[in-house]
Image (cartoon, rainbow, N blue to C red):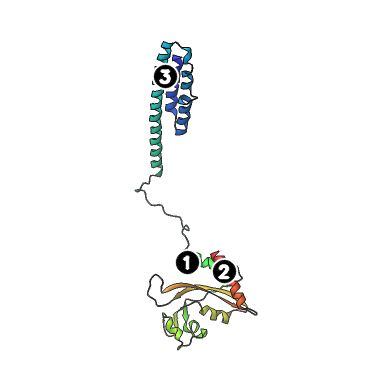
Amino acid sequence: MFEELKQIREAALRQLEEAVSSEELNELSTSVLGRGGKLTAILRTMGKLSAEERAEMGKRANLVKQELAERFEERRAALAELAEQRRIEREAIDVTLPGVRKAAGTGALNPLTLVYREIRDALVGLGFTTFEGPEVEYDEYNFTLLNLPPDHPARDMQDTFYINDKVLLRTHTSPCEARALKSLDLPFRLVIPGRCFRVDEPDASHSPVFMQMEGLVVDRNVSLADLKGTIDSFVKAVFG
């Protein structure tokens, strides 16, 4: 029995050094020191020994149990430190390395582009077609053909970037409506997006450059009910 205790100790120490994970260590600890472990099993057979041998066996078994418990804790701490070191090495960043240049085409779309496409796709799904016009526009299309003659008060409300008396940066996308009516065959359903420009001091809610989008439908038998249904479908498509 003393020889068996010696073999259990030596085998446990050998397997302890070979354990490479906390899982293996826990399994080994259970198989040796647990309630159903080898050391516990040999202690249960001490009743076969004489009183003198039982005392000696108990003393040796306790020493082996204490030694193994300490070695298990040391090994467990060593494995934890090794795991932490490997994590640090795996996550380490060498700041002296040159930067990694991203491949062409790996950028992201501008938020305005994303919103524009979402709105456009919702209206295209309702049968609309995209129509665009120039950002540098004639005064005639920007104002006059939209029933805004030179003395109209709405012109005073829209501080305009004039290039000369007849040419300007459009203040809205509505000039495209005049262009569509003069150039397209009827009927049509248009969604008109684009940048617009007005003299304005930039702040949290104002910008001299902004995006606008409008719709234009020209057809027979079109009513406010069609407008309401279009807005309802559009809002649900974009906002859920």
* Near-viewer residue (114 or 10): 10
Residue type pointed to by label 3: Ala
Q: Secondary structure at mark 1?
A: helix
Q: Does the image show residue 21?
A: no
Residue type pointed to by label 2: Phe
Q: Secondary structure at mark 2?
A: helix
Q: Residue 160 location in percent, x, y?
A: 42, 80
Question: Which sits earlier in the primary sequence, circle 2 or circle 3?
Answer: 3
The numbered disc on residue 61 is 3
The numbered disc on residue 112 is 1
* Near-viewer residue (167 or 41): 41
Residue type pointed to by label 1: Leu
- The residue indicated by pointer 2 is 234
186 vs 67: above or below: below
Residue at (39%, 30%) from the top-left corner? Answer: 73
Closest to the camera, between mark 2 and mark 1, is 2
* Near-viewer residue (236 or 143): 236
22 vs 103: above or below: above
The answer to whether 6 appears left or right of 217 in the picture is left
Q: Residue furthest bottom?
A: 151
Q: Residue 91 location in percent, x, y?
A: 40, 44
